[in-house]
Image: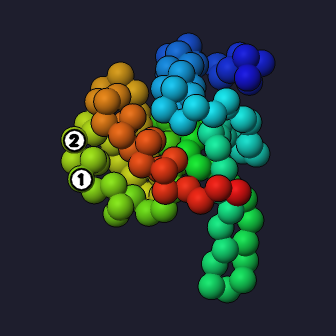
Amino acid sequence: MDAFLETIPDERRRAEARLLIDLMTEVTGQAPELWPANIVGFGKYHYKYDSGREGDTIAVGFAPRKAQTVVYVTGYLDNYADLLERLGPHTHGKGCLYLKRVADIDTGVLREIVARSYRNAAPA
């Protein structure tokens, strides 16, 4: 994981990645694993759609991108509405949060989001 972190050119983004690795490791009890597209994942779960498509993906994780850090959760963010209103500055898609600066959010609330995502993931 250290080798991956060293590839992040921005020092602030690199420090945020270390903070998120520590937070997610503590909350999930899982070691970080590098997934494709430079996603750092914690735990995994098996999904199966009504269409028959299925696979394995992370239970929770993040990707340090150039413009922001993307946090991936299990399920849709509608299931986290009660926490998102307390998180602090962010935007989101259906299943991911976009954080411009991790220092600007409430990491206690992020812990709750990570814990809920991990709990909601069915074991793979």
Question: Around disc 2, counting alpha carbons within 10 Å, would you say few (fewer than 14), some (14 to 19), or many (20 or more)?
Answer: few
Please report the residue visible at 68 percent of the width from the left and 20 percent of the height from the top: 5
The answer to which quarter of the image holds residue 65 is: top right
Q: Position of residue 36 (x, y in %)?
A: 76, 45
Q: Which mark is residue 86?
A: 2
Q: Which mark is residue 109?
A: none
Mark 2 belongs to which amino acid?
Answer: Arg
The answer to which quarter of the image holds residue 6 is: top right
Q: Is residue 29 visible?
A: yes
Question: Around disc 1, counting alpha carbons within 10 Å, would you say few (fewer than 14), some (14 to 19), or many (20 or more)?
Answer: few
Seen from the viewer's position, the closer of residues 120 and 98 is: 120
Mark 1 and mark 2 in contact (Cβ < 8 Å)? yes
Q: Position of residue 48 (x, y in %)?
A: 66, 74
Seen from the viewer's position, the closer of residues 13 and 114 is: 114
Q: Position of residue 63 (x, y in %)?
A: 59, 38
Q: Position of residue 32 (x, y in %)?
A: 67, 31
The quarter of the image holding the C terminus is: bottom right
Question: Which element carries disc 1, helix, strand or loop?
Answer: helix
Identify the image's colour scheme: rainbow, by chain, secondary structure or one colour.
rainbow
| Residue corresponding to mark 1 | 82
Question: Which element carries disc 2, helix, strand or loop?
Answer: helix
Residue 69 vertical position relative to residue 91 in the rendered view, above or below: above
Residue 8 vertical position relative to residue 81 in the rendered view, above or below: above
Mark 1 belongs to which amino acid?
Answer: Asp
Q: Is residue 20 visible?
A: no
The answer to whether residue 96 is left or right of residue 10 is: left
